[in-house]
Image: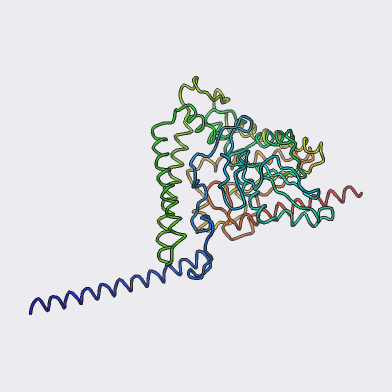
Amino acid sequence: MKDFKFMNKSQEILKIALINLGLLFIFLEIGSLGWYFLKHKQFFYTREKAQDKSALGINLEGVRLNESIVERFHPFFGFIQKPSADFRPGFKVNNYGFISPYDYPFKKTKPNQFIIGVFGGSVASNYGIFEVQNKILPQYLKQLPALKDREFVILSFATGGYKQPQQLLILNYFLALGQELDMVVNIDGFNEVALSNLNNKNKIDLAMPSIQHILPLANLANNSLSIKAMKATIRIQENKTRINQGLESLQHCSLAACDALTSVYVQNLVNNYKRDVIKFEKEGNKQQKDDSGSVIYINTNKSVLQDSAAFEAMAWNWAKSSIFMHKVLAASNVPYFHVLQPNQYYQTKRVFGEAEKQIAFNKDTPYARAVELGYPALFKKFPNLEKNNIDILNAVNVFDKTKDAVYVDSCCHYNQAGEVIFSNYVGRSILESLRKDERNKKK
């Protein structure tokens, strides 16, 4: 009799537990549905299935899903990205390491094609990708009668970490190969001060390519990575495998709760990956005390320059490189537009929301002080640029009127909303400048 009562009681407990688990699952699913709607602005069960891993709602900025070290030394450019056909739909890392649908040099296939070359660092590279996909600049240029029937081809000669004089050298290299260009847009400024400042602090010549990129490559070439750097590399590889597996699972979730829990798990892996990348860069950027046996030669300075002298030299290097780009293009009547990119560490009237502040600012970044000191130094060179007839587009205030978040990281990069605002500013400014030139010719 007691056993019978015990069995009944056990069944009751099991029934209650199952009911509670069912209710917990229902509440979790309802909460996950709401979370998904707020995040993606669509209902989970009727959502458009993401065809690309970058559209799954995970912030993958700075995450290299295929390889952790994708840069390769280049004898003329300093470094390039490893050529690869597997980048994203419609793009590849081409034969010269640039993200583009085309290999270079690109030859016109139609007489009405109009080739626009984009130069600079990662912000310029992202702009080039965005323009190929959305054609905002061509929409503005088509408002000119002479260009309304042209087919616009956007070619990116920009790569993350590039800074002057790399843009100047790359331009001249491809012109020597016979690359045709009908217009050039150079987007820079941030790397010239932020990365050159890191060079200075490590006694590397300011005009040399970014120490963040070339020193880890040099250490790899010399087989001189530290134990800490190698451990960070192993963790990066392990996390990268887990991230890819998590993203694969995320693409096949049939319940909102699965999507929510997997998203949190994958984003945590991404955060760990980024922390290890920072550790690797910190260790990989350490110079060996005795580099006399190195197979890579890097110009060095005897001492760290004072900030005033360093930023003045950076600004002159930036301005003179741009002037020479303009001169070589002007010889062939190719319009050249120089854009100073906006950056969160240069203070304007923009008001940041609390959520964006968490993303856009890092109190430990070495970039903040470099931009605070460097951008005013660049501004002082505007008269020199204008004296040499350069169209300098100062974009530092372009985000001042928007309340939407525009930054995706604590470095310098923009989200979709930011790219739209920035691209419209560039397109509108170039159109106004070309119209002004037309009016002046008629006088």
Determine the residue positioned at 45% across, 69% down. 33
Front residue of 21 and 355: 21
Quarter holding the N terminus is: bottom left
Using the rendered view, name the quadrant where residue 263 is placed.
Answer: bottom left
Q: Position of residue 288 (x, y in %)?
A: 46, 26
Q: Is residue 114 above or below residue 261?
A: above
> Is residue 395 shown left or right of residue 436?
left
Q: Is residue 371 above or below residue 402?
A: above
* Count of numbered circles on the image: 0
> Is residue 331 shown left or right of residue 283?
right
Front residue of 312 and 289: 289
Q: Residue furthest front?
A: 109
Q: Position of residue 11 (x, y in %)?
A: 19, 76
> Is residue 2 shown left or right of residue 308?
left
Q: Position of residue 89 (x, y in %)?
A: 59, 53
Using the rendered view, name the quadrant where residue 179 is placed.
Answer: top right
Q: Residue furthest top?
A: 292
Determine the residue positioned at 45% across, 28% down. 223
> Is residue 436 shown left or right of residue 289?
right
Q: Residue furthest right?
A: 443
Front residue of 57 and 254: 254
Q: Position of residue 390 (x, y in %)?
A: 77, 41
